[in-house]
């Protein structure tokens, strides 16, 4: 299937590793030009070089901190200097710390909001006007299955990603008539570095092993296994495509059936 995004410019947040890297790889495979950003400059340059070599596409790597509005402006300006525009925005940052309510003071909440809500709002604010003017754009927010079924121990993520969902659903209606779609992709338990960190944290708290943590998650998933980043990225690429032009305002899990809700 030709997704119709060859030559489109995609900005992918948190793209040095994990889900962001997988999304960038898949978009590159469809012929998109890439703007990659993450805080770690060395890992980002490695990812950019590997994607460029593997897919022969143009890649601009911009180390930045998306929790800082100045960092958002830096990556957007860099994208415009290199490519003149951004057609596809994939918002993605690392998840906030795990733990119960009592573990998170005001400063932790503030940082989590900056990381997982403000970064989405600020990137959208910078890029949406030009998308509306060109009457074509794709905004895809990477959130979590926690917005449909809260995950125990992830209070910050459960709370803040729900705010992103509300913003995206409302915005989708505001821009639907102008060729811009806004959707959320909800990864479930996926084999990434982030999940490895959660497995180690759970194991330390319970006096078990990371392998036992993985086994417990897999037991909750109807497919009986963790997801792979490439499976998640396939949906991102489809939502970024011309083929998905009539899909907007959705929040779609990629979770092997973990969410038990009807909608």
Image: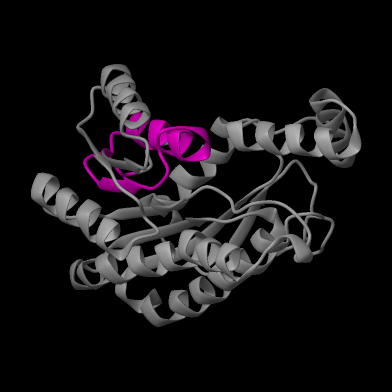
Q: Residue at x 54, y 31 (%)?
A: 230
From the viewer's perspective, is residue 135 above or below residue 64?
A: below
From the viewer's perspective, is residue 55 above or below residue 143?
A: above
Query: Can residue 208 be seen at all in this image of the molecule?
Result: yes
In the picture provided, is 144 more to the left or to the right than 138?
Answer: right
Count of numbered marks: 0
Residue 39, position in %: x, y? Answer: 37, 42
Q: As rendered, which of 216 and 227 lies closer to the eye?
A: 216
From the viewer's perspective, is residue 49 above or below residue 167?
A: above
Query: Can residue 263 be seen at all in this image of the molecule?
Result: no
Q: Residue at x 76, y 66 (%)?
A: 101
- Name the colouring of the figure: one colour
Quadrant of the image for the N terminus? top left
Q: Residue at x 71, y 40 (%)?
A: 189
Quadrant of the image for the C terminus? bottom right
Residue 122, position in %: x, y? Answer: 35, 68
In the picture provided, is 238 more to the left or to the right than 214?
Answer: left
Tell me, yes or no, whether the highlighted magenta stretch contains residue 29.
yes
Q: Quadrant of residue 152?
A: bottom right
User: From which residue to which does the magenta span run?
Assistant: 4-33
Residue 221, position in %: x, y? Answer: 83, 40
Tell me, yes or no, whether the highlighted magenta stretch contains residue 197.
no
Q: As rendered, which of 15 and 26 lies closer to the eye?
A: 15
Q: Residue at x 24, y 69 (%)?
A: 135
From the viewer's perspective, is residue 61 above or below residue 128?
A: above
Q: As rendered, which of 251 and 198 lies closer to the eye?
A: 198
Q: Quadrant of residue 195?
A: top right
């Amino acid at each position: 299937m030709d997704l119709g995004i060859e030559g489109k410019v995609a900005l992918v947040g948190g793209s040095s590793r994990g889900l962001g890297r997988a999304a960038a790889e898949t978009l590159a495979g469809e012929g998109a030009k890439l703007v990659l950003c993450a805080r770690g400059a060395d890992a980002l340059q490695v990812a950019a070089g590997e994607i460029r070599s593997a897919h022969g596409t143009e890649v601009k790597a911009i180390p930045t901190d998306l929790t800082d509005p100045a960092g958002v402006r830096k990556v957007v300006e860099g994208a415009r200097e290199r490519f003149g525009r951004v057609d596809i925005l994939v918002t993605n940052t690392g998840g906030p710390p795990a733990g119960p309510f009592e573990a998170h003071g005001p400063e932790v909440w503030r940082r989590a909001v900056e990381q997982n809500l403000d970064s989405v709002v600020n990137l959208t604010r910078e890029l949406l006007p030009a998308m509306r003017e060109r009457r074509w754009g794709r905004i895809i927010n990477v959130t979590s299955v926690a917005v449909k079924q809260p995950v125990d121990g992830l209070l910050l993520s459960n709370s803040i990603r729900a705010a992103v969902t509300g913003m995206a659903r409302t915005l989708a209606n505001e821009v639907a008539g102008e060729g811009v779609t806004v959707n959320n992709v909800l990864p479930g338990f996926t084999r990434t570095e982030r999940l490895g960190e959660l497995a180690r944290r759970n194991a330390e708290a319970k006096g078990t092993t990371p392998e036992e943590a993985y086994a417990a998650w897999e037991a909750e998933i109807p497919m009986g296994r963790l997801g792979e980043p490439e499976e998640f990225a396939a949906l991102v690429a489809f939502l970024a495509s011309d083929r998905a032009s009539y899909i907007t305002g959705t929040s779609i899990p990629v979770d092997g059936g973990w969410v038990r809700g009807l909608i």
